[in-house]
Amino acid sequence: MTRAKRDAIWPVFAEYRAQLASRKLKEVDDAYRDGALLLEGETPPFASIIVDETQDFGPQALRLLRAMAPHDKNDLFFVGDGHQRIYNRNRAVMSACGIDIRGRSRKLYLNYRTTEEIRRLAVATLEGCEVDDLDEGSDEVKRYKSISHGASPKVHNLEHLEEAFGCLSEILRASLGEDRSICVIVPTKHDANTVYGVLQAENITATILGPDERDHPDSKAVRIATMHRAKGLEFDEVILLTPRSTDGIETRADTVKRLKYVAITRAKKFATVLQY
């Protein structure tokens, strides 16, 4: 934007912030920044901090983490995967946030969860999607590999959603007798409720994983989860039900690709993609 355009829209943002302040509310990043300011000149409250899913942390969150522990040996430990960046669109440069990882970082190239066949399908969904290394550089996928092999994942290109539901039921009936954990992954909560209704009509026991609900590994029910909810989980078999086109989806194309990558990599042994 030009300076004139920024000046023109600034009153809108000023009023928005004033409305938040009157209700004692803050944007998340503003709360992070204010937290870091409160720690200035104070003794950091923690000796060491371990951070997972670093790729989804923005600059203000990283600056707050830096302020929470003293600069010392083993003060901060970060784990992240740029391939799975689905929450924070603004790429944070760790060195710009006071976190120097040059010469101290390591890349883990061995995948212990998915088979090599599933990993390759997941990586293929990221075609044309730039992946960063969390600190100004770009990542590549050539050196990554899985230590196990298994059945080739299946991709079905279907004409419409009803056909996808029919295919889903057939796959589930064939898999339910194999004593494996199964999750049907869909884009939205509405999709999850729709799939749940379809499976109920087919007399297939299923449960929707809500935002605060923990998965029970011993459950025999088919799990249904959104792409976001499935993150961090793993199942013997995953069936991804997804539109072939991203038209009409209120998410950037590269984020949709990363969501599909996350969904497919939840599978340990078997993966099926139903595109409609």
Image (cartoon, helix red, strand yellow):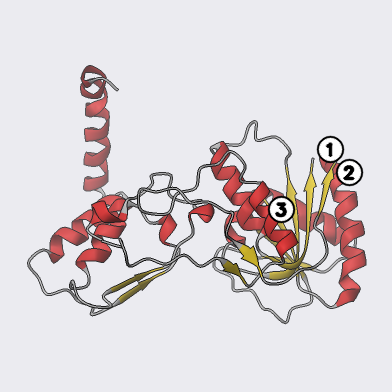
Say above or below: 5 vs 131: above
Q: Is residue 31 visible?
A: no
Query: Which element is circle 1 on?
Result: loop
Residue 263: x %, y % from top left: 65, 57
Element on which disc 2 rests: helix
Quarter of the image that includes the N terminus = top left
Q: Relative to 248, is 101 on the left or the right?
A: left
* Label disc, if present, on residue 163 of the rendered structure: 2
Q: Position of residue 113 (x, y in %)?
A: 65, 71
**Foreground: disc 1 or disc 3:** 3
Amino acid type indicated by mark 1:
His
Query: Where residue 268 appears, x then y in whole percent?
Result: 71, 69
In front of the other: 121 or 107: 107
- Please identify the residue farthest to the top as the structure is shown: 4
- The reply to whether discs 2 and 1 touch (Cβ–Cβ < 8 Å) is yes
**How many other residues sit within 10 Å of disc 1, few (<14), some (14-19) or many (≥20)?**
few
Q: Mark 3 or mark 1, which is nearer the start of the sequence?
A: 3
Image side of residue 29 versus residue 91, left or right? left
Mark 2–mark 1 Cα distance, whole angstroms, equals 6 Å
Label placed on residue 160: 1
Q: Is residue 4 left or right of residue 179?
A: left
Location of the C terminus by quadrant is: top right
At horizontal 9% and vertical 71% (from top left) the residue drawn is 42
Residue bearing the label numbered 3: 121
Measure the C-alpha gap from mark 1 to mark 3: 22 Å
